Amino acid sequence: MTTHGTQVPVTLAIKARPPRARLRQSSLVWALTATHFVSRAGGVARAFLVLYLTQERGLSPTTAGAVVAAVGVGDIGSQLLGGWLGDRIGRRHTMLVGFLGTAVALVALGSAETMPAICAAAVGVGLMAELFRPVGSAAVADLPAQERVRAFGLLFWAANLGFTVSTVAAGVLVQQGYGILFWINAAASVLAALIVWRHVPETRPPMSKAARRALLPVLLRDPVMLAMAAIHVVYFTMFLQAFSTLPLVMAGDGHGPETFGAVLALNGIVIVVVQPIAVRLLDGRDTASVLAVSMLLAGIGGGLGAVVHSSAAHAASILVWTLGQVGVSVMFGATFAGLAPADLRGRYMGVASTTWSLGAVLGPLLGTALLDHAGRTALWAACSAIGFALFAAQRAVAPALRRRTSAPAYDAPSTDGAKDDPEQPTWVAGLTAEERRASTVGDRSRSTASHLTAASLKPRQPNHKS
């Protein structure tokens, strides 16, 4: 404004997110982090499943492999089912179904004696155990965009810390027999369910039944999402050679399982130490650039396998792979969350999680076939070439990705006159009306303010006509 021709500085009255809203968001993230840690730390049964089936149940290696494959089939279905349920019955209820269902399926698997019962329980474990992954990601995606990278980083860090704990704990517990592994794993799932029940509120944005959309028509019209999903399937197929063909290559170099275990432990240790630092360094960086460089690093780390033979050299190559893995993991969840329409977040995150599951199936199949028919040099050269190809592909999709992830959530259908903002998650239900408005308007005002130009803030000149 002006007073007698004198310009007075104009400021934007932008409200910060109210303290109660920030506190609830922080509590949600830490509750999800605890859930991820408990479920992974208690996941002691799966690593010894093949040994349990062959030594305790007397199955042949081929039959035991088929049972493990049944768990994998359940995993793939679990990602898509979890996303669908998360959008239908809510994130919280889906997590409870998943964790409690996992506990029941694990007890059934540890008690089953006939082959049909073992296979049915194995599929049940796979189908239930990963339900929480897409809905946990969707719950984080329901948070404001600027908080997602940190939140997803915490979940990944907690999961890897839990995995490191489970590998050590399983080796100690198995000395008491295989049966205890299933009971400990089931108890951990029940504990995770209790954390969800007590501390995780529902975050799904309110949506009327009439406004709900099917996933497939939207997904098929979303080339950016399809391209990113395809890129990540290829990336995980390449990256997971570290857990499928690398132990075979190291055995060929004369290294025993204990050496591979030590090298693999290095991966977990580096993630636990580096991940929190990486989140702080990479938060706010260009997503496409971080993903491109990280995938290239993972490919280069794989390529080193063609020339390394000592245990120290293998550890160095794993270190390079791991740095690439950390970079991808920091951006993975937030990237797909930014692409997801509000009403399809659960299902979009389910598709994102499925890229890992598909890579876990394709990686061992393609990697071992290439190793058998062409040798280690061809295998690791292919990994390196894939890393460069992924770098190029990620750079090609970067402009479209930037446009999408920097824009507000798109294509969200109307809630048919619902009083609540369709983008407003239900975890704010306990806030006052003023806090709700501040929580929503604050985010939108910050977004709008960043696009205002100096001209738009120029004060109006006074009218001196008498």
Image (spheres, rainbow, N blue to C red):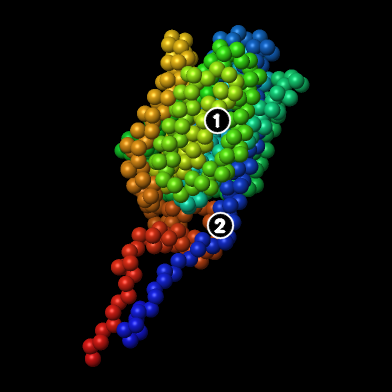
Element carrying mark 2: helix
The quarter of the picture where the C terminus appears is bottom left
Residue 45 x, y percent position in the rendering: 65, 24
Q: Nearer the viewer, residue 4 or 14?
A: 4
Q: Is residue 271 visible?
A: yes
Residue under the point 52% across and 64% down: 435
Residue 154 x, y percent position in the rendering: 57, 43
Identify the image quadrant of residue 457.
bottom left
Residue depth check, mark 2 versus mark 1: number of the one nearer the observer: 1
- Which label sits on residue 22? 2
The quarter of the picture where the N terminus appears is bottom left
Residue under the point 33% across and 64% down: 453
Q: Amino acid at mark 2?
A: Arg
Residue under the point 70% across and 23% down: 171
Element carrying mark 1: helix
Residue under the point 33% across and 86% down: 4
Vertical side of 54 occupied by 149: above or below: below
Question: What residue is pinned by disc 1?
Answer: 319
